[in-house]
Amino acid sequence: MKKFILATLLGLFLMLTLGFANLAQAQAPTFRINFTVQINPNVTVDMGANVVVNPSKPKKGSTILVLNGTGQNSNTFIPLSQQLFADSVTTKLVARTILLNYPGHGNSSFPISNSGVKFGDLTLGDYVTSLIESLKRLNEIGMAPDVIMGHSLGAEMLHLAQQRLIGQGTNFRKAFGVKSAIFFVPDIVGPPAWAFTDSGTGTAVLSMLRVEDPKQGSIVVFPPPVWIGFFYGNLMGQVVSGAPTPDQAVANGFISTDSATMAAEFLGVAPFNRP
């Protein structure tokens, strides 16, 4: 049954990326949650998430934690949740989705620190810590997921979090009861080759999108037309049918900034090596 869930969800993810702008966004009840986590000795974050609840309330339905990609946030994946609950098969299998926002994304706060740490200073390790600590809090409040899925950066974070947990003598299943994981178009953890970074394209893209902000530090900023082209463009540079317009992406709150330090790490931009 779990294999069937995974295959179905992968198909729905493809539907999402090809045309989520046309999906309804206000059918299933959605609410927000917040909780505070410590991501390093000097920094806390008021983490937030969108929780989308299946109106059918299946008794044995899964709780799925979703992690978005770079430049996105939890709003980007609300249409996926709506589609899961509208589908005649998955509505019987999924009880709710928890769409977690990274630090500085959506309803998650920027880093709170007395030592001057800015959003742009956050590392990939800090993002991963925010995930692990959030799973602890979700368990405490009775919202533990049994399925986790990540897109792009989110998938890489799942990989790195599992590596960290294994190094501590545990894993997602033992520590949090997670039974299944889905990687959708994942960023690639080294040492396997990744053409996007190995060709120098990743470095060029980061250079183009990097902005120095007086309050938040060095951050990655996607102008809306660039965001659409980046996430909805084909290999010919054409935006695919069904993609949202830049104005729709802004109106729906799909676009977020990211820490440029974190981005440089996962892209392996000097002085960093790919994780």
Image: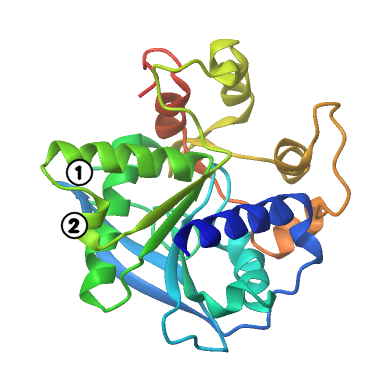
Q: Residue 134 or 61: which is nearer the viewer?
A: 61
In primary-sequence order, the first of circles 1 and 2 is 1
Q: Position of residue 86 (x, y in %)?
A: 68, 77
Please tell me which residue is depicted at 31% across the width and 70% down the height of the picture: 144
Left or right for 177, reference 154: left
Q: Position of residue 97 (x, y in %)?
A: 49, 70
- SS at mark 2? helix
Residue type (three-letter) at the residue carrying disc 1: Leu
Please tell me which residue is depicted at 50% across the width and 88% down the height of the picture: 57
Q: Going by the picture, which residue comes out furthest to the front?
A: 1
Residue 161: quadrant of the picture: top left
- Is residue 138 placed above or below 160 in the rendered structure? below
Quarter of the picture holding the C terminus: top left
Q: Position of residue 60 (x, y in %)?
A: 41, 81
Residue that mark 2 sits on: 175
- Is residue 95 placed above or below 80 in the rendered structure? below
Residue that mark 1 sits on: 165
Q: Residue 240 or 179: which is nearer the viewer?
A: 179
Asked whether disc 1 touches disc 2, contact meaning CB atoms under 8 Å apart, the reply is yes
Q: Position of residue 87 (x, y in %)?
A: 68, 74
- Is residue 257 placed above or below 86 in the rendered structure? above
Residue 215: quadrant of the picture: top left
